[in-house]
Image: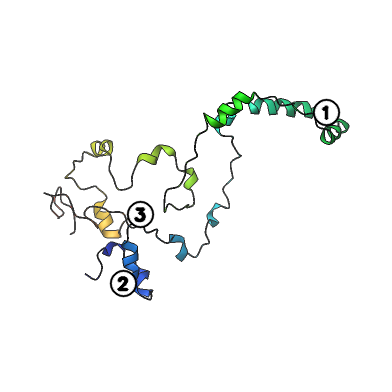
Amino acid sequence: NRVKRPELVEAHDVTAADPDFLTYLKGVPGTVPVPRHWGRKRKYLQGKRGIEKPPFRLPDFIFKTGITEMRAATAEDEAGMSAKQKNRARVAPKLGSIDVDYRTLHDAFFKHQTKPTLTEFGDLYYEGKEFETLKASHLQPGKISERLMEALGMTVMTPPPWLINMQRYGPPPSYPHLKIPGLNAPIPEGCHYGYHVGGWGKP
């Protein structure tokens, strides 16, 4: 009973100069935790070596202006030029070769421009984050959707099938502070611990 939130205590916290104060700081709302890669032997982002970087892609609001077709046509013209003509064009370039309507450019940047996805407060980059699909952005870890509950034949009072293994091996490594009923959070009212049908395992 030394701390209010014992689920925040980790094994290496005992080596701190003041473990009680460290646990208090962890429990303050809005505290950003130290990145988990600090204690790993492998350096940060070393796992990205073999991943091929995709080519740059123009945002949709710029692509719709038709600038890519104009640049492709200019590149085709340059491909048919001799070295002498290329040098002459480089020294004295012709202005206005790419003619884009100013109204189209104005609308692209001031009307149709979209904001890129930004990270939230305390959200840190980790390896493979850019490969996550935006379709799963509305899902929350640990929260079972109604569709999944129906597929598993569950109700609100039914424990999830992975609860027993989590009680044995601990929470998922990617979500060490996740609140899971029956593991580090209270179970719903009317439910009981035990290994019988509908039981919530070990208390």
- Where is residue 159 drawn, in percent x and y? 20, 48
Mark positioned earlier in the residue sequence (3 or 1): 1
Instruction: Identify the element where label 2 is drawn.
Output: helix
Could you say which disc has been placed on residue 175 in the image?
Answer: 3
Foreground of the two, 202 or 13: 13
Q: Which of the two marks, 3 or 2, is nearer to us in this view?
A: 2
Report how far apart the C-alphas of labels 2 and 1 lie in the structure: 74 Å
Query: Residue at coordinates 36% horizontally, 39% vertically from top-left?
Result: 138
22 over 161 or under it: above or below: below
Depth check: give the residue in front, 134 or 191: 134
- 77 in relation to 118, above or below: above
The residue that disc 1 covers is 81
In depth, the one of 196 and 86 nearer the eye is 86
Tell whether 152 sits left or right of 137: left
Q: What residue type is labelled 3?
A: Tyr
Q: Which residue type does callout 1 highlight?
A: Met
Q: Residue furthest bottom?
A: 17
Q: How crowded is mark 1: few (under 14 residues within 10 Å), some or many (20 or more)?
A: few
- Name the quadrant of the N terminus: bottom left
Instruction: Residue type at mark 2: give it.
Output: Asp
Q: Position of residue 78 (x, y in %)?
A: 78, 29
The reply to whether callout 3 and callout 1 are in contact (CB within 8 Å) is no
Give the vertical position of 75 relative to 42 (above or below). above
Disc 3 to disc 2, how far (Cα)? 23 Å
Secondary structure, mark 3, is loop
**How far from the left and from the top, in percent, is residue 33?**
39, 60
Query: Which residue carries the number 2 mark?
Result: 20
The residue shown at (23%, 36%) is 150
Mark 2 Cα-neighbour bin, 10 Å: few <14, some 14–19, many ≥20: some
